[in-house]
Amino acid sequence: MGMDRRRFLKIAGLGTMMGFGGKAAFELLAPGAVEASLKDLPLTHAKKWGMVVDMRKMTHEILVACQEACHLPHNIPDWGDPRVEIKWNWSDTYEHTFPGMENAYMDEHFLEKDFFVLCNHCDNPPCCRVCPTKATWKREDGVVMMDLHRCIGCRFCMAACPFGARSFNWGDPRKAPPDLNPGFPTNPDYPTRSKGVVEKCNFCAERIAVGEYPYCVEAANQLKEGTLIFGDLDDPNSDVREALRSHYTIRRKAELGTGPNIYYIVS
Amino acid sequence: MYDGVKIIIGIIIFLVLLLFPAWYQVGKAAKVPDPKLAEKALKAEQCVEPKLFMKTQHMKLLDEWRDEVVRSADRYYQSSSGKTYYKSLQVTCMDCHSSKKEFCDQCHDYLGVVPYCWDCHIEPKENG
């Protein structure tokens, strides 16, 4: 089993973090106190969650950290094969991220840079429109959510999503190669998926419900503050709105009319 | 009687095969389920609702929790005792009922019920 020191430390750190912040937090608080304290948390309620990705600050190291911070606690297996890979956030080139926006003589560093991509939690999500069982739908707070209990694995949503944000479980995640997935399932407090369902980023619905930032946002900002800005797009005083006011931003394939809610500051 | 020996042997083989399920099971009556409460559950004295309700309605309660959490993001349960619980099979239920083998499986196996919760949800790690 190959695990270098760096990866071990990362997993150990993440495990401790979840131990303190997750389950323990509920046990420390008296019943009822949880409910009461939620009302004071600024993150818990929103009308439209959104994210701004500051690509000026984004580095390869941060991208890797974001993926690990998401994939380990969400029990996402590594199959070691791009044909069956499962990803909630990943990285891609400029021309794949913003097709049609590549110009002949543009700054070369854009073409070399890896862009942080995830589900865009669209205003008008085509994945939800095609789902025959309403297993995926748009929540009132803007999160495009999945109910895996209802998913029948028809993969219409994968065909409908123009961003490739959805992955299909070709096999039982618990049967993923153990040498690529040490200690899987890595988070005993979160379920895995079963064979034959589609999954994607859920904007860490389980975390924003208790007033925490999504894992990727937390991980990125630990390495460089302000790389990922998360907040309520409907609130004019939120951090995301401030970032959108003070910078020129672009969105992926906005011309398709799906209304993506992930914004990119590129320069 | 023509071929009497063959016929009698045939009848004996037929009867043995016919009665095989009956004598194979003799003395092997299925064990009466004996769900054991883990230490933490014993200390808590009461589950989220009274014992009788949990015994008969836990599947409905879990089904409601599932829909409310996933579809309405309603993550807290107000119990009839006035306490508030975080609705989660893995985090709340299995925290007290820490042994699936000695608790859940006891009755489920006896009744031949195979809930597919565990296809995705992770049961607590047990010794051995």
Image (spheres, coloured by chain):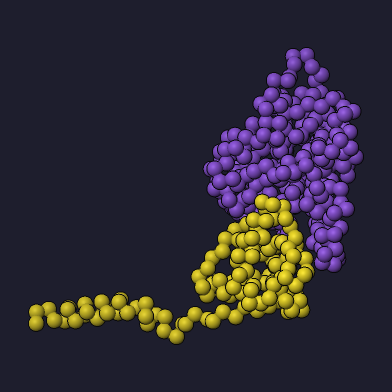
Chain colours: A purple, B yellow
Quarter of the image where one finds residue A203 = top right
User: Farthest residue toward the top?
Assistant: A105
Task: Please tell me whether residue B43 is drawn above or below residue A103 in the rendered image.
Answer: below
Measured as percent of width and height from the top left, residue B57 is found at 61, 70
What residue appears at the point 59 percent right and 58 percent down from the top-left corner?
B119
Task: Please tell me whether residue A224 is drawn above or below residue B23 in the rendered image.
Answer: above
Give the left or right position of residue B53, taking residue B21 as reference: right
Quarter that holds the N terminus of chain B: bottom left
Task: Please tell me whether residue B105 is drawn above or below residue A178 in the rendered image.
Answer: below
Task: Mark yes or no: residue A59 visible.
Answer: no
- Which of the pair A23/B127 is nearer the observer? A23
Measured as percent of width and height from the top left, residue B45 is found at 74, 79
What residue appears at the point 75 percent right and 72 percent down from the top-left corner?
B81
- Which of the pair A236/A199 is nearer the observer? A236
Quarter that holds the C terminus of chain B: bottom right
What residue appears at the point 70 percent right and 44 percent down from the top-left corner?
A139
Measured as percent of width and height from the top left, residue A103 is found at 75, 16
What residue appears at the point 63 percent right and 77 percent down from the top-left corner?
B52
User: Farthest residue toward the bottom?
Assistant: B27
Measured as percent of width and height from the top left, residue A154 is found at 53, 43
Give the left or right position of residue A155, taking residue B14 as reference: right
How many discs mark residues in the rendered view?
A: 0
Task: Mark yes or no: residue A43 visible.
Answer: yes
Task: Please tell me whether residue A210 is drawn above or below residue B115 in the rendered image.
Answer: above
Quarter of the image where one finds residue A17 = bottom right
